[in-house]
Amino acid sequence: AFLIPYVISLVFCGAPLFILETTWGQLLSVGGLGMFKICPIFKGVGIAAAVMAFWLNIYYIVVLSWALCYLWNSMRLDVNVPWRSCNNDFKVLGISDGIDHPGSLRYDLALYLFIAWVICYLCIFKGVRWTGKVVYLTASFPYIMLFFLLVRGLTLPGASLGLEFYLKPDFSKLLESKVWVDAVTQVFFSYGLGLGALVALGSYNKFHNNVYKQALTVAQAGPGLLFLAYPSGILQLPYTNVWSMLFFSMVLFLGIDSQFCTMEGFFTAIIDEFPIMLRASKYGREIFVGVICLISYIIGLSTVTQ
């Protein structure tokens, strides 16, 4: 039943706002802060969006660090992956007793987090033209992987029961307000609405670009990142290691796409606001992006503790 309010929210809320933000950026050729020059009194909205995008980047990239962790642990010579069994007494969670006591730093996750930031920096430091080349790989591979997972899933025993559960909606859920709130939230989060990312990406379009066609294409393609925390499902497939590597590679690529879109929205907004300072130097953008990534990594270490 969730798909019904999701599609309605997408048609009447997500797609119009997607077109509005992209068109706004294309019309003015500026980022999320500069676009409010047509109505300066609302510039605070752009500042709030930039601040929100900054903090979103810090915790969102943790998903990539976990994907890297699972990907690395999938690269084993034996047939078993580490999460298949827990037969040893020394394999404990090692977590703290609550959020009030963060505990010590998880050095392995801190390393994966650093690698994730380096990857994102290399994808975005040269600007949107360089990023566009990276997208050919990061956007294409997940669809290929999803196709293979779909084919394999349909051939497993009980696949018909899963399809029936998926396609047979429970209409009583439509009367619950939480379902509609979750649907709208998912639309905003999936398409990066209200963060300035779409305005920034639209600002690189030509003035007469057909933004309506592109917006509808993106809306039909589906959300950017769905991190399915069910690696145990991979255990039901033959050649578990291979499927795990492919699956978490897909998650990594999807996460990178979502991450550097939000990052580009933040960086474009700041660079457009201070063009003389950040564009005067030959490597002004590269240095600025590197400094922000380093600061974000240091702050993000608080998210990879016990």
Image (cartoon, rainbow, N blue to C red):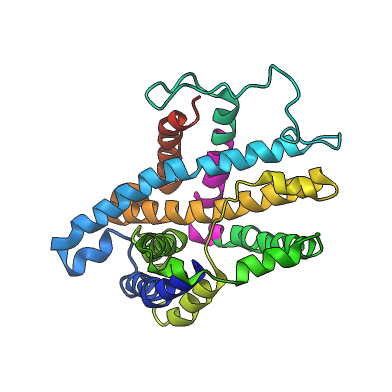
Quarter of image, res 20: bottom left
Q: Nearer the viewer, residue 201 or 157?
A: 157
The x, y position of residue 112, in whole percent, is 59, 34
Q: Where is 157 relative to 97, above or below?
A: below
Extreme residue toward the left, this view = 41
Residue 209 in sight from this viewpoint: no
Name the dominant secondary structure of the magenta segment.
helix
Q: Where is 37 relative to 273, above or below?
A: below
The x, y position of residue 206, in whole percent, is 43, 76
Q: Where is 216 relative to 303, above or below?
A: below
Q: Count the marks: how many? A: 0
Residue 20: in magenta span: no
Residue 2 in sight from this viewpoint: yes
Extreme residue toward the top, this view = 90
Identify the residue at horizontal 15%, vertical 63% (top origin): 40
Quarter of image, res 92: top right
Residue 37 as seen in the image, left or right of residue 190: left
Identify the residue at horizontal 33%, vertical 49% (top origin): 52
Residue 123: in magenta span: yes
Give the residues drawn in magenta, as a range. Answer: 114-131
Q: Nearer the viewer, residue 164 or 122?
A: 164
Identify the residue at horizontal 16%, vertical 67% (top origin): 39
Extreme residue toward the front, this view = 172
Q: Which of 215 and 276 is in front in this view?
A: 215
The x, y position of residue 61, in whole percent, is 50, 43
Residue 210 as seen in the image, left or right of residue 255: left
The x, y position of residue 49, in whole percent, is 30, 54
